[in-house]
Image (cartoon, rainbow, N blue to C red):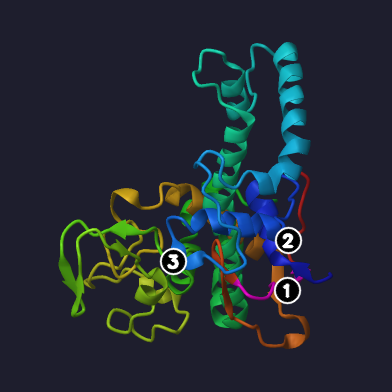
Amino acid sequence: MAELPLYLLLLALLLAVPFLSPTQEDEALAGAVLAGPLPVVARGDAPQRDAPPDEAGAPGNDGFHRHHLPGASREQSRRRRRRRRRRRGRFLLRIQSQDKTNPVLTTENIKTVIIDIFVASSETAATSLQWTMSELVRNPRVMRKAQDEVRRVLAGQDWVTEESLGDLHYLRLVIKESLRLHPPVTMLLPRDCREPCQVLGFDVPEGAMVLVNAWAIGRDPAHWDAPEEFAPERFEQRGGAAPVADFKGTDFEYIPFGAGRRMCPGMAFGLANMELALAGLLYHFDWEVPGGGELDMTEALGITTRRRSDLLLVPAVRVPLRDV
């Protein structure tokens, strides 16, 4: 098979719709929106906007939404007429059509919500999966162990199902280790210091904006043995051993989803998507780097911390895909 731009494949799997890749203008505008609460992502060539939150980021996506939202609205109207007893129209468009809502949900609002969903769930999950696949092809032992588990648990099935995920224990460890080394958002959302304090000998005044570097915390040798090594087994719970760090916000040496009341609300949703997509990639295909070369693992800071270069891998079918 030909080389695949894996990032696009992962996004298509996560969105379950034909994928339209964001343009450079889209990413620049999104970066400008993030530059307000997160100045570190601002670039000298990025447009700076002071638009209200419900309008931020909308213009750069006009092409996509102008073509797809009206069609979706017409489609929903036809479905409503045909199947009034089976209301399965899109949630946001239903709200828009209800005059009881005040203020009315505008198309601009819908566009912004769609951008939020894309960036906060699909984009971050696809970025994490791309890093996970990068680490797997660089670590053949881990790749084989993960594939052996997936193919043993799913033996005889045509595709991955949600019911199978509970038995994929090692796959979950692989994802946790990938999130430790490659949190999709390097700098967590900013916090305001509520009272003067001291951190590592530095005085932090009240009201100061504090940025937490999840990337550095996950690689801190004070908390992790061989922190640069990709070793999912470090998260295994062994009898009599101390509890293993988890990403639910109570173990501060491991916070890829943040911590506290403002940690990522889509953690469970994102993890389920990642597990489904990764299990499918490992179940149906073997993967290798074209020509057996070395992967460039350089990072690029943007909306998420993506690979600087696209991940291109050669798949070989092991379990043929069947029509659903």
Q: Which residues are magenta?
A: 307-316
Check if mark 1's residue and mark 3's residue have beta carbons within 8 Å: no
Q: Which residue is mark 1?
A: 313
Compared with 276, 85 (above or below) is above
Compared with 27, 262 (above or below) is above
User: Which residue shows up at 45% across the image and 63% down it?
Assistant: 39
Sort mark 1 into few (<14), some (14-19) or many (20+) by Cα contacts within 10 Å.
Answer: many
Q: Position of residue 125 (x, y in %)?
A: 55, 57
* Residue that lies at the very extreme toward the right in this rendered image: 2
Q: Which residue is mark 2?
A: 319
Please say whether residue 63 is visible from this viewpoint: yes
Q: Which mark lies nearer to you, 3 or 2? A: 3
Relative to the observer, which residue lies in front, 280 or 15? 15
Sort mark 3 into few (<14), some (14-19) or many (20+) by Cα contacts within 10 Å.
Answer: many
Determine whether, in the image, residue 283 is placed left or right of residue 95.
right
Q: Quadrant of residue 48?
A: bottom right
Q: If the image is split into quadrants, where does the C terminus sit?
A: top right
Q: If the image is split into quadrants, where does the N terminus sit?
A: bottom right
User: Which residue shows up at 20% across the image and 66% down it?
Assistant: 205
Residue 324 among those drawn in magenta: no
Amino acid carrying label 2: it is: Val
Q: Disc 2 or 1, which lies upstream in sequence?
A: 1
Amino acid carrying label 3: it is: Lys
Amino acid carrying label 1: it is: Leu
**Disc 3 versus disc 2: distance between alpha carbons?**
26 Å
Q: Which mark is residue 176?
A: 3
Determine whether, in the image, residue 52 is placed left or right of residue 256.
right
